[in-house]
Image (tube, rainbow, N blue to C red):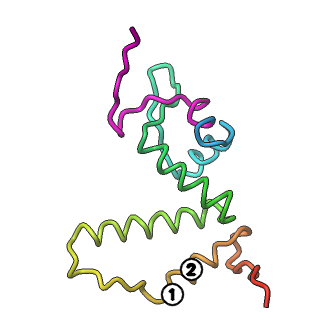
Amino acid sequence: MRHVVFHGPKEPVYTISVAARLLGVSPQFLRQVENEGLISPSRTESNIRLYSEDDLKLLSRIVYLSRVRGVNFQGIRVILAMEEGERDKADDGPDRHSGEEPPGEWDSIRRFSRDGRGQSEPSSRKT
């Protein structure tokens, strides 16, 4: 009989190779994300990286922004900070947030395009 062990979302259980395979990226990409300070996986006593379910959710968001949307790591840092701020506002109660984006926030995201030089990407929409 096989025993199944359930882990909480914050418990680090996935090695870098397993996390990379689950996310469809290379272990080097995960190391790069860590070097950029976007995530800090737990480490074993022998210094092996371990990722939790929560880490995988964050990494999935990072992979999406990087690979699908073409945002560089500096832009991802800005986006994640904005999203964290929105979650904090939501936790403060409904009367503290009007539901509108503060002016210029999405403009600042666009400035952090692939090259990170403050230029927005050309529109891919056909006219």
Which of the image's four quarters has the N terminus? top left
The span picked out in magenta is: 1-20
- At label 1, the amino acid type is Gly
Residue 4 versus residue 22 in the image, above or below = above
| Vertical order, 71 against 108 (above or below) | above
Of all residues, the one furthest to the top in this rendering is 1
| Residue at (36% x, 33% y) in the render | 11
x and y percentages locating residue 62 in the rendered image: 57, 55
Residue at 67% in and 78% down: 118
Q: Amino acid at mark 2?
A: Ser
Horizontally, is 21 left or right of 14 in the view? Answer: right
Secondary structure type for disc 1 = loop
Task: Specify the label residue 89 is tagged with.
Answer: none
Is 61 situated above or below 97?
above
Give residue 42's position: percent from left, percent from top: 44, 34
At horizontal 41% and vertical 32% (from top left) the residue drawn is 12
- Is residue 30 magenta-colored? no
Residue 17 falls in which quadrant of the image? top right
Q: CA distance from mark 1 to mark 2?
A: 6 Å
Q: Are marks 1 and 2 in contact (CB under 8 Å)?
A: yes
Front residue of 23/107: it is 23
Q: Is residue 66 left or right of residue 91?
A: right
Instruction: Name the residue tied to disc 2.
Output: 108
Quadrant of residue 107 in the image? bottom right
User: At numbered mark 2, what does the secondary structure look like: helix, strand or loop?
Assistant: helix
Q: Which residue is rendered at x = 48% and y = 51% of the image?
A: 58
- For the stretch drawn in magenta, the main secondary structure is loop
Quick one: 93 or 2, which is closer to the camera? 2
Residue 89, image x, y percentages: 29, 72
Residue on which disc 1 sits = 104
Asked if the magenta segment contains residue 15, the reply would be: yes
Circle 2 residues within 10 Å: few <14, some 14–19, many ≥20: some
